[in-house]
Image (tube, rainbow, N blue to C red):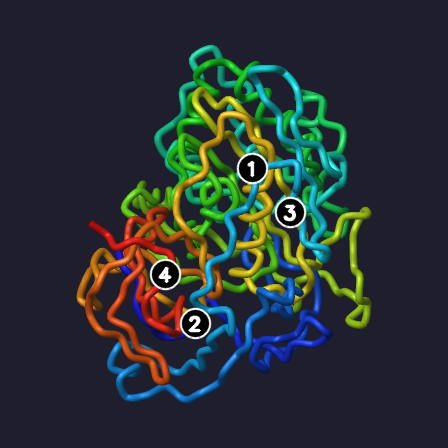
Amino acid sequence: MHAEPPGTTSAHTPPMRPATGPAATGPAATGPAAAGPAAAGGPGSAAPPPAARPPAARARWIRRPLTGVALALGLLGAFLAAPASAGQPRQSPPAAPGVDIPADVTAGVAVFDRSTGSFTERINADHRFRSASIVKLLLTLDFLWDRGPGYDIPQQDRGRLEAMLRSSDDDEASYYWAQRGRGAIIERMVPRLGLTGTTPPPAAYPGYWGYTSLTAADTVRIYRHILDEAPAPVRDFIMGNLHRATRCANDGYDQYFGIPSAFEGPWAVKQGWSGFSSGGCTADDGTPAAADAVAGAGARGPAGADRPPAAGEAGAPALPAASPARSAADVDLVREALHTTGTVGADDRTIVAVLTLHPDGTPYGTAYSGLTRLVGSLDVPGARRPAGTWFETWGDGVRIRAGATTSSAVVSTLPAGADVLVSCQRRGQLISDPPHSSAWWAHLPQYGGYMTTVYIDAESRLPGVPDCT
């Protein structure tokens, strides 16, 4: 599992537009500004400018054409940027009391220790966010609610639910949202679980399941119900799938931000994201296939009521284009949302819910790293933080490989600009992307693979990192 130079630009990644404001340090881009709310449940239509970062961590971008060597390694049609801080390790996030919430990020945090029955963190825990894919927990509970006493799940539904829980499949969520009454699902689940900040999507967006409002406190209540009140078959089915969450979601996003990156296992997660452009994550063998493919059924009908069109597409609700802060029912539908929720520690000891909104234009890799740092700074009883040194990266489409050569199997593709944890380094194939070159490869224990240090470090060997033995 190695990473090497970037490959072709992902089909999921639209052109960037010029960054604006004092925090803009990235390359110029050409895409239009978003015309409406981010699409529910997964990647949205907005392609926002980079978020502000502390001065010491800001990237200085160098634009240059790709060289013949880079092209031979599969670097096609992209400009790459090397940060001024490349190769300089950043400190691993400390445990509480210093919770690391960037000044430009809105966060709702709730951490509940089941062994003591008390919260160790509560920060804006009742602030309402659009749920994105976290609502899939409620869709699953609603489906299973009246199936007792055996709670048998038909095979096709089992495939759908597993894909939705483990790999955050949006088509399956849209199927159950339409089949079971859309907002009526939320209206049923709120009194069942005693939720206080959860509401259906706004009336103008009845098909957008990801616009369900949710709070960090309610997310903890959902997990407490699953773990401590739900019948054993329901608990075991849901938590069993969350413990096997795949790195690559079915829409091509790397969903191991937050809890999976900040802590060693055991953990279980249900993640959510909305409004970003990413994709390109290499599907792992454990990714459940879509239920229709498993069952051999034909394609479903037009999206229509099941999956609403993204803002700006035919059939999407019209929105005032000039409104800088569109929201519905006091829930922000525009800024990029990234949520990490689940459990950490033996026997699902601690429930963690961190819901975040990022400045419009924040790249996925930036939000991915920021949320991971935030989660790593929390007081999470039973958590174990991974050993190694964190580094910033640069480049788009950087591959992680099974060995220290470009001929080794591709394990995954790194989200552009995401921080990586490095445990050791070894010599391998020389990689050149002028003016940088290196024969050193960094081992990324959380991926189980390697990436060339070219896209971490302009000086080849990483400082303070031991050799792999």
Q: Residue tagged by mark 2?
A: 395
Q: Earlier in the sequence, mark 4 or mark 1?
A: 1
Q: Nearer the viewer, mark 2 or mark 3?
A: 3
Q: Residue tagged by mark 4?
A: 413
* Towards the viewer: 452 or 205: 452
* Towards the viewer: 63 or 388: 388
Q: Residue tagged by mark 3?
A: 100
Type of the residue with mark 1: Thr
Secondary structure under badge 4? strand
- Can residue 313 be seen in the rendering of this structure? no
Tell me where residue 222 sits by quadrant.
top right
Q: Earlier in the sequence, mark 2 or mark 4?
A: 2
Type of the residue with mark 2: Gly
**Numbered circle sitting on residue 44:** none
Q: Is residue 78 above or below residue 180?
A: below
Specify the farthest residue to the left: 407
In whole angstroms, how far apart are the C-alphas of marks 3 and 1? Answer: 17 Å
- Left or right, 151 with respect to 184, comes to left
The residue lying at 37 percent from left, 45 percent from top is 292
* Towards the viewer: 337 or 57: 57
